[in-house]
Amino acid sequence: MTAASGAPLSAPLLLTLQTVEAIRRAFKHDLLRTAVSLDLGRSTREVMPADDGFWLDGVPYGFPERVRERTVYYRNENAWEPVARFSTGLYKLVPTEWGPPTFEIDGIKMLVSQKVSPMDDAHAKVGLVEVDGVDVLDTCGGLGYFAVAALERGARRIRSFEISPEVRWLRTLNPWSPGPDPRLELTAGSVLDHLDRLPARSFGSILHDPPRFGIAGELYSRPLYERFARLIAPKGRLFHYVGSPNRLTSGRDVPAEVAKRLHAAGFKNVQAQGDGLLAQLR
């Protein structure tokens, strides 16, 4: 699925183990040229396979010294480097069989990818709320897939927030993240620090995709939902990711707790939808 909003500008060449193996197979079979993707499946380009690398547009590129599974490499000047950064934890892009990558923090996958493309998953969730012609609040922007889906579905404007500088950096190297678009405003920082500055009833829909409850419990609280209720237009819809934490090990039914808090904050028709909850303002 192609992102209508476009890829980041000046995206570098990207390699994965799958791409390297495809070029090596072509060289082994004495092929002069082969078509591969150097942007995680958004397009294909012809390269000339070489002994331990390839030629592209007359320029030779060697492979990384070691190519690991579940790692994306980007061309940084004259070297290949993993699309990963370490700060409070290890943040990295992880390739998928679908094209659009997921990302991990300390090995914990942040987006679904086992049975469905993370981009298609975003489209399915955004399709549950009405975004055509309305302003949308995207509380935890991540790689921007909710924003891509909302833009493609006709959102008038999207206010998106992403607190992590590491995740924002991953977006600059991910060709599936949204590129510049006058309808999309990405704010660096926590949505919690900005909600009270936004006008009441200014959003037709809210997309709330927080980290799991054990990491960011404040993003599952009744006070937050009351702030959402102030911002969303009457009968506006909210999609809230809650995940499926193990009730036996946690001793808690997080989706039921969230549904109760949403009701108390003024939302109705709270219903389970996949790994999240769909609700509507009374």
Image (spheres, rainbow, N blue to C red):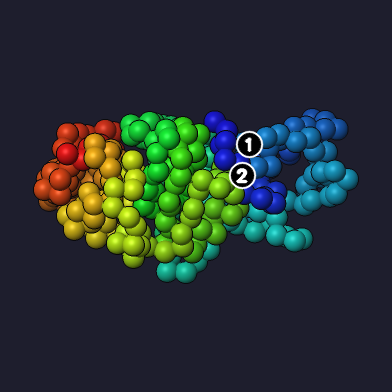
Amino acid marked by disc 1: Arg
Q: Is residue 28 visible?
A: no
- Please tell me whether mark 2 sits on a helix, a strand or a loop: loop
Q: Quadrant of residue 16?
A: top right
Q: Residues within 10 Å of mark 1 (few under 14, many from 20)?
A: some
Identified at 88% across, 45% down, the residue is 58
Residue 207 location (% of width, % of height): 35, 44
Of the image marks 1 and 2, the number of the one nearer the N terminus: 2
SS type, badge 1: loop
| Residue 157 visible in the current orientation | yes
Image position, residue 2 (x, y; %): 57, 33
The residue at the point 75 percent across, 36 percent down is 45
Numbered mark located on residue 7 in the image: 2
User: Who is closer to the viewer here, 235 or 47?
Assistant: 235
Identify the residue at horizontal 56%, vertical 37% (top origin): 3
Can you name the residue that lies furthest to the bottom here? Answer: 87
Left or right position of 203 against 277: right
Q: Are marks 1 and 2 in contact (CB under 8 Å)?
A: yes
Mark 1–mark 2 Cα distance, whole angstroms, equals 9 Å
Residue 123 in the image: x percent, y percent?
A: 43, 33
| Residue linked to disc 1 | 42
Q: Quadrant of residue 146?
A: top left
Q: Nearer the viewer, residue 225 or 79?
A: 225
Mark on residue 99? Answer: none
* Image quadrant where one finds the C terminus: top left
Task: Please state which of the two labelled residues, at mark 1 or mark 2, is closer to the viewer.
Answer: 2
Image spot of residue 21 (x, y percent): 67, 39
The structure residue drawn at horizontal position 57% and vertical position 46%, both measured from the top left corner, is: 181
Q: Amino acid at mark 2?
A: Ala
Q: Nearer the viewer, residue 102 or 63?
A: 102
Count every numbered label the image shows and give the total: 2
